Image: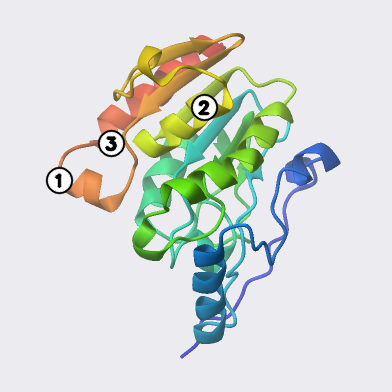
Amino acid sequence: MKTSTIEKRPAKDQIPPATLLAAEPNRDCQLCPRLAEFRAQARAKEPAWHNSPVSSFGDPRGRLLIVGLAPGLQGANRTGRPFTGDYAGDLLYATLLEYGFATGRYEARPDDGLALRDCLISNAVRCVPPQNKPLPAEINTCRSFLTTTIDSLPRLRAIVALGRIAHESVAKALKLRGATVPFSHGAIHQAGRVKLYDSYHCSRYNTNTGVLTPDMFRKVFAKVKADLD
């Protein structure tokens, strides 16, 4: 049985300005042929799903940007909202609610009424990749959208990178030399007016294997909150 699409109705202050909308690829982006073909296959199989590049979500005047890897096949690729509908979203949104970066209730649906406060969520790669593994060329190609997103946030002061790939793409977008900002969970790197905070990705695999515990994840956001306050 096909899963029905639920229309997303963002709060007025969650609708991004034109400068941020310009940072998003169009629905039928063809810049990465492999991802475009995988997206076409998903559309044929599940026509009611989002099956398009997933736009950033949250407060366009937020001081915090969270960058993940890419949409999950049955998560953001299905629902159209970053980290919505998969396990990683359960931990991420619970943490954001705890530290005041979100309000409402997270119910794994784009119409659940959840709103982000002082925070925007995006991905290093905007389209779902096969096996959740984008190729280096795809990461490099999609970085133009990430860079534009970063440049479009007037009050940006903190970026949390979820995982090594997100960290490396953010570092390149910020024009940081990789050797000077090695990825490490809990590490903090200064990039002008912006601080880059590293965290292991909040994936089910990482939490199930103990690579990342909820307490480790919360400590990253506790530090961000304290620094912003």
Alpha carbon distance from label 2 to label 3: 28 Å
Using the image, tell me which numbered label, if any, was put on residue 226: none
Where is residue 184 shown, x and y percent of the image? Answer: 29, 23
Where is residue 25 shown, x and y percent of the image? Answer: 69, 53
Pointers 1 and 3 in contact (C-beta within 8 Å) = no
Element type at marker 2? helix
- Image quarter where the C terminus lies is top right
Alpha carbon distance from label 1 to label 3: 12 Å
Alpha carbon distance from label 2 to label 1: 29 Å
Q: Residue at x 34, y 17 (%)?
A: 187
Q: Residue at x 23, y 36 (%)?
A: 213
**In this orientation, which residue lies closer to the viewer: 123 or 7?**
123
Residue 119 falls in image quadrant: top right
Where is residue 5 shown, x and y percent of the image? Answer: 61, 75
Using the image, tell me which numbered label, if any, was put on residue 209: 1
Q: Residue furthest left?
A: 209
Element type at marker 3? helix
How has the structure been colored for display?
Answer: rainbow
Element type at marker 1? loop
Q: Is residue 214 above or below residue 185?
A: below
The amino acid pointed to by label 2 is Lys
What residue sits right under mark 3 in the picture?
Answer: 214
**In this orientation, which residue lies closer to the viewer: 211 or 151?**
151
Where is residue 196 shown, x and y percent of the image? Answer: 48, 20
Q: Is residue 179 above or below residue 150?
A: above
Q: Is residue 116 visible?
A: yes
The amino acid pointed to by label 1 is Thr
Question: Dot 3, crowdedness within 10 Å: few (<14), some or many (≥20)?
Answer: some
Using the image, tell me which numbered label, if any, was put on residue 172: 2
